[in-house]
Amino acid sequence: MAMIQCISPVDGSVYAERAALSLDAAKDVVARARKAQKAWAKRPLEERVQLVLKGAARLNEMSDVVVPELGWQMGRPVKYGGEYKGFNERSNYVASIAADALAPVVVEESDRFERRIEREAHGVVFVVAPWNYPYMTAINTIAPALMAGNTVVLKHASQTLLVGERLVQAFTEAGVPEDVFQNVFLDHETTSALIAAGSFNFVNFTGSVEGGRSMERAAAGTFTGLGLELGGKDPGYVMEDADLEAAVDTLMDGATYNSGQCCCGIERIYVHESLYDAFVEKSVAWVSNYKLGNPLDPETSLGPMAHKRFAKVVREQIADAISKGAKALVDPKLFPQDDGGAYLAPQILVDVDHSMAFMREETFGPAVGIMKVKSDEEALALMNDSQYGLTASLWTRDAERAGRLGREIETGTVFMNRADYLDPALCWTGVKETGRGGSLSIIGFHNLTRPKSFHLKKVTA
């Protein structure tokens, strides 16, 4: 029997392990989900919404267990208190718009015709969630999918093995029927076999580009709907009229929070030449204030990366950039806890360019490159010189300029004077190799349902 393990970045120990389900056992889970779906969809919408909110509330009551578990599983410092702020904001927002988002579009209601478009649940939704924000990324789909009348099967990354169990425990204890929301432990082969067999009506995957390709290959020919949120290399652009202090504070936080392991983290920054020197100097000072260490220590502000192999990629990208002329500005002596393994010091590189993998490939670590630019045109060309497109962060006092530039940027979200934030009222989406589809907002509900048209001609005497 194959075992799935979570190796803790805290000390390299096996923190948790679970047996992977056989294909037959996994098919049984799907069969139960399918059997439960029609009755769940027939419940009043408000009842489904309230049960999901009760599940979210129950998870909040489990913070004493959830927060240290996150530290052990993927290294986030306990001082940040888990993911409850975003988790609750998203759950509450989708609950508040569910009735409107799922309401029929009435075209005609007369004595001759009823014509309308209703939203119908897909059926069984499969959520494959990542380790970096394991609760927030999962709830983006779980909450609206359940509210819309789907049943949900959740598979979590091995690095956050216990998160799916905790979510299902909270929702089941809150009254969501057991077969309506189920957690599974699956290896890649069984996952692919289930998708290839057309087991699910919709699959939402958050993870790597290669993982997204595997999902598409598995689903080929089944016509299963796919939502894919994959890689990113999100840029920041600081214009000459920016609020410098605010830009440094937000962009450095966006580049390094969660050890840089954020889907929409800032991975490259372009600064107008007039502010460049001051921005770099202030950024180095900002990043140098981190306390790297054990995430279970309440003083720690920067934990280890989730796995030593992720840290190895960051170190290799930095070394390659330095070999090509880049300069590292953060003094490694400030971070003696950097052990060459999962514990990695933050870093800022200058004298970088797009010939370096560090400025092109996803880094997903607490390191960022800063380049000087002369104009919006130069910044725009550099921002678009990427195979990814999730978010772009523009820093200016001129909203019209940001809007104009934003229309030219190949991205899913344009921010002005903020970064690394997911607004649940807006659609979370990406372009190019960042994926396709979109979650949250009204559009998220529409992606988790299908339209059904009713054209009813009335018999008149």
Image (cartoon, rainbow, N blue to C red):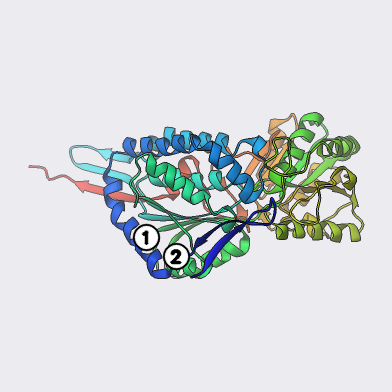
**How far separated are the C-alphas under marks 1 and 2?**
10 Å
Question: Picture coordinates of residue 206 (x, y %)?
Answer: 56, 54
User: Dot 1 surroundings within 10 Å: few (below 14), some, or many (20 or more)?
Assistant: some
Residue 21 tag number: 2
Camera-side residue of 258 and 43: 258
Camera-side residue of 211 and 307: 307
Residue drawn at 33 percent across, 61 percent down: 31
Label 2 near label 1: C-beta < 8 Å? Answer: yes
Q: From this viewpoint, is residue 147 visible?
A: no
First in sequence: mark 1 vs mark 2: 2
Residue 1 tag number: none
**Residue 250, image quadrant:** top right
Q: Is residue 124 left or right of residue 437?
A: left
Residue drawn at 52 percent across, 34 percent down: 89
Image: 246 above or below 326: above
Residue type beneath disc 2: Leu
Question: Picture coordinates of residue 18 (x, y %)?
Answer: 51, 60
Question: Picture coordinates of residue 258 (x, y %)?
Answer: 68, 44
Q: Is residue 397 left or right of residue 336?
A: left
* Residue that badge 1 annotates: 29
Residue type beneath disc 1: Val
Image: 208 above or below 368: below
